[in-house]
Amino acid sequence: MKCDRPTNTWTFLLIVINLGKKDFSESGHKYKCMEDNKITDCNDSLDSVPDNQFIKELKIAVQDLLWMSESEYPLQVVYLHNWDDLSQENLLQHYGYNPDTKVAIKDFTSFFNSVTREQEWHNEEEAAEVKRYQFLVNLLTNNLHNIQVYRLGAVEIDVYILGKTVHQAIAGLFTKIIET
């Protein structure tokens, strides 16, 4: 993890909740911390965000839930407070991607279709996972509007599933997909 020098003002608050990670607070200063290419505000607790109940529920919903592609990656909660314009250009710039990065915007419902559809051949564990994904989709659709799925890159694809909350923050999920 690398941390910039302390800063007193932020134009946005970004919290990436990475399960199993510790609080990166240090002596009351605000730091911009970089971990796994995600910028986090190391000092802000979850209780300080206006959408804290939704974010807490989302964190619980994705706990130990992996997105399956050619590899398995965890789903991570993303929360950006006071971020006015969610566009692919802003997303690329904010997360430090090259402006020429391939971006594909996918339909939210179709993105989750394969993991929310029950199959008669599913065993008990697979059926339980489908129920968890169905709950996750309902949680997102009940708490976010204008949900978009942004796929950034090729082969190793970073996926941001983002929408606006009632408090006009941007919230959602991040994961990675491998497609060769």
Image (cartoon, grey):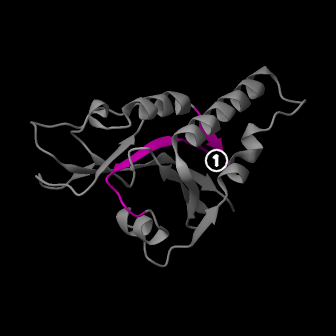
Query: Which residue is the site of mark 1?
Result: 71
116 to the left or right of 97:
right
The residue closer to the viewer here, 147 or 93, is 147
> How many discs appear?
1
148 to the left or right of 130:
left
- Residue at the top extreme? 124
Q: Please identify the quarter of the rendering in which residue 94 is found.
A: bottom left
Q: Which residue is drawn at 10% across and 37% down?
A: 28
Q: Which residue is drawn at 65% across and 61% down?
A: 106
Segment colored magenta: 65-85
Which secondary structure lies at badge 1?
loop
Q: Which residue is drawn at 68% across and 59% down?
A: 179
The residue closer to the viewer here, 77 or 100, is 77
146 to the left or right of 50:
right
Query: What amino acid is labelled 1 in the image?
Result: Ser
Q: Is residue 71 above or below residue 65?
A: below
